[in-house]
Structures are given as C-alpha cells and as structure tokens.
Image (cartoon, rainbow, N blue to C red):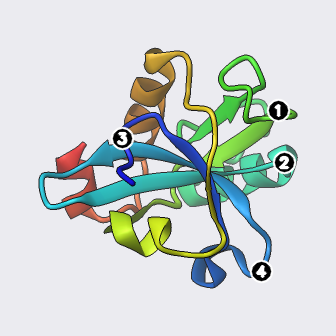
Amino acid sequence: MSLKVGDVFLAINPGFSGDKSHFHIVVQKTKDNLVVVTYTTTKIEETKRHCRRVERITFPSIEPATIVLVSPSDSVSFTEECAINCNHVQMMSEESYTTKQAFKLLQPIKNPALIGKIREAIKQSPIVEQKIIKIL
C-alpha cells in the first residue's frame, strides 16, 4: 500500500497519541518514502490555547497561525469539526504506518488547498524541525 499527499488514515501511534487513534493527514511524501503527517483532535479550544502558548500570543482574540480547522466537508472521513496543531508534525517511513495492524486508510482530503494551508501553518511553527519545514 502506498500513501499519497492528502490521504487520511487512522493509526494508533502510542508515542504520539497513546492508545487512542487519531485521524492522520499526509502533508508531504519524499522520494525515500518518508511521509510528513499531522493529526487531528476534537479538543479545539484546548488546541488553540496550546498554540497560543507556543506562539507566545497573549490575547485570546488572536488566532494562532499554527492551527488549522477541518470539517466533514473537507473529507467524509471526518465526522465532526477537528483541529490540527501544526506544531505537532511527524516524519516517519510510510511503512511505519501502513504495516501496523491498527492502520486504516480512509477517504482523502477533497480540497487540495487545505493541504497548502496545513503546510503554511507548519512553516509558521517555532518548534517544528527545520529539516521538515525544508521538505515542505
């Protein structure tokens, strides 16, 4: 199985999400079959607060640059509105996801502009590794 940019999948990754599975979104794929992924959470307000802290925003009325909201209109895989904290990005081999028993490929992102928005939010992160930002 091969992942491509815009794919949405469920996978349990104890190092990132404990035993709870999250929707993962493939943001970039390299020639070496490394994939850059973000993941969603339904804890939107908590995620906004976390992004504000990372970006050192002191006013709650200012939206952080590192958060992206997704909804069921972006992919039928999403059942409710979710947030992506673009300060949390992983780059791993494609096989590290696809070979897990807890891997399930879902419906991809319908709007390619959303992937661009996620990439731009990742680039705004003060904590994402530069090697990942350069790949985007």
Q: What residue type is labelled 3?
A: Lys
Q: Residue at x 51, y 56 (%)?
A: 87
Few, some or many C-alpha atoms within 10 Å of disc 2 (few <14, some 14-19, many ≥20)?
some
Few, some or many C-alpha atoms within 10 Å of disc 4 (few <14, some 14-19, many ≥20)?
few
Quarter holding the C terminus is top left
- 134 to 19, vertically: above or below: above
Q: Is residue 125 left or right of residue 57?
A: left
Image coordinates of residue 79 in percent, x first then y, are 86, 34
Spatial separation of the CA atoms under disc 2 and disc 1: 7 Å
- Which secondary structure lies at badge 3? loop
Few, some or many C-alpha atoms within 10 Å of disc 1 (few <14, some 14-19, many ≥20)?
some
Q: What residue type is labelled 1?
A: Glu
- Which secondary structure lies at badge 4? loop
- Which secondary structure lies at badge 2? loop
Would you identify the image quadrant in which residue 129 lies?
bottom left
Disc 4 vs disc 1: which is toward the camera? 4
Camera-side residue of 80 and 63: 80
Spatial separation of the CA atoms under disc 2 and disc 3: 24 Å
- Which secondary structure lies at badge 1? loop
Spatial separation of the CA atoms under disc 4 and disc 3: 25 Å
- 131 to 6, vertically: above or below: below
Q: Which residue is drawn at 85% across and 52% down?
A: 43
Image coordinates of residue 84 in percent, x first then y, are 64, 45
Residues at badges 2 and 1 in contact (C-beta under 8 Å)?
yes
Spatial separation of the CA atoms under disc 1 and disc 3: 23 Å
Q: Which amino acid does label 2 sit on?
A: Thr
